[in-house]
Amino acid sequence: MKNVFLLLVGLAIIYLSTTGYKPTRNVNQATVNPGAATTFKKNTTGHLAIYDQLNLAQTGLQRSVFEYALRGWQKIDTAKSMLTIVDLSQPSNRKRLYVVDLFNKKLLFNTYVAHGRNSGDLVANQFSNTQSSFQSSLGFYQTLNTYMGKHGLSLQLKGLEKGFNDNVYNRNIVLHGADYVCEDIIRKTGRLGRSQGCPAVPYADSKGIIQAVKGGSCLFVYAPNPDYLAQSAYLAQPYMSL
């Protein structure tokens, strides 16, 4: 019997070696493709549905503006899920800045934001890409690094649209806090104070916003400007995964 058993074992080994069989090993599933469960893919469907999930219509943000922002974000070279929208179609006495975490489907900030002093009074309607214009620049931006300036913690910005905002870095257009962006100013004047072209936010919110969006996320400054809407390369094609 022992010889028969050994013969059967030997035949089994020969068979398995000829079929290319390899024994499996016990692998901890968490080590296979680390982070796969939390990887954020920009072509995942359903981003536009976040507009309704977060009730953004009640905040004053139009669905079309959110869709424009998604179009550009989808084309920008960033893995960041943060999307910041500055909606200059709204007057400055409205909370028209939105920071949306697309991955976690959360509205992190909805607050006031100033426009350039030469862009308009209550509503911004003039825009520029030139030095010392003191006007806001439309289009898609990418956030860069933080630094400490005269307004405290500030965030450098890179304009991505030639002819519309590609001079903002040289113009020192940055995201920063400002004491003229507050409800006291609105009560006294009916509008916010104005910047030299920077998207200035309340000091109380500035640090949190900057920390949330720094390091390569997408920022979209919108206004219903016919020239921009017709010429923006980021809005030329529809968003791919609505």
Image: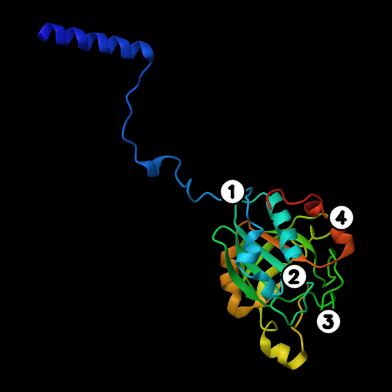
Where 176 falls versus 14 (above or below)? below
For residue 87, which numbered disc appears in the image?
2
Spatial CA span between label 2 and label 4: 18 Å
Q: Residue furthest left?
A: 1
Q: How many marks?
A: 4
For residue 61, which numbered disc appears in the image?
none
Location of residue 134 (image quadrant): bottom right
Residue 109, horizontal then vertical, whole percent: 60, 72
Q: Mark 1 or mark 2, which is nearer the start of the sequence?
A: 1
Front position among marks 3 and 2: 2
Provide the residue designation for mark 3.
Answer: 121
Spatial CA span between label 2 and label 1: 25 Å
Q: Residue at x 68, y 69 (%)?
A: 175
> Amino acid type of disc 1?
Lys
> Amino acid type of disc 3?
Asp
Front position among marks 3 and 4: 4
Spatial CA span between label 3 and label 1: 40 Å
Front position among marks 1 and 4: 1
Q: Mark 4 or mark 2, which is nearer the start of the sequence?
A: 2
Q: Residue at x 75, y 64 (%)?
A: 65
Provide the residue designation for mark 1.
Answer: 41
Please report contact status of discs 3 and 4: CB closer than 8 Å, yes or no.
no
Q: State which quarter of the image contains the N terminus.
A: top left
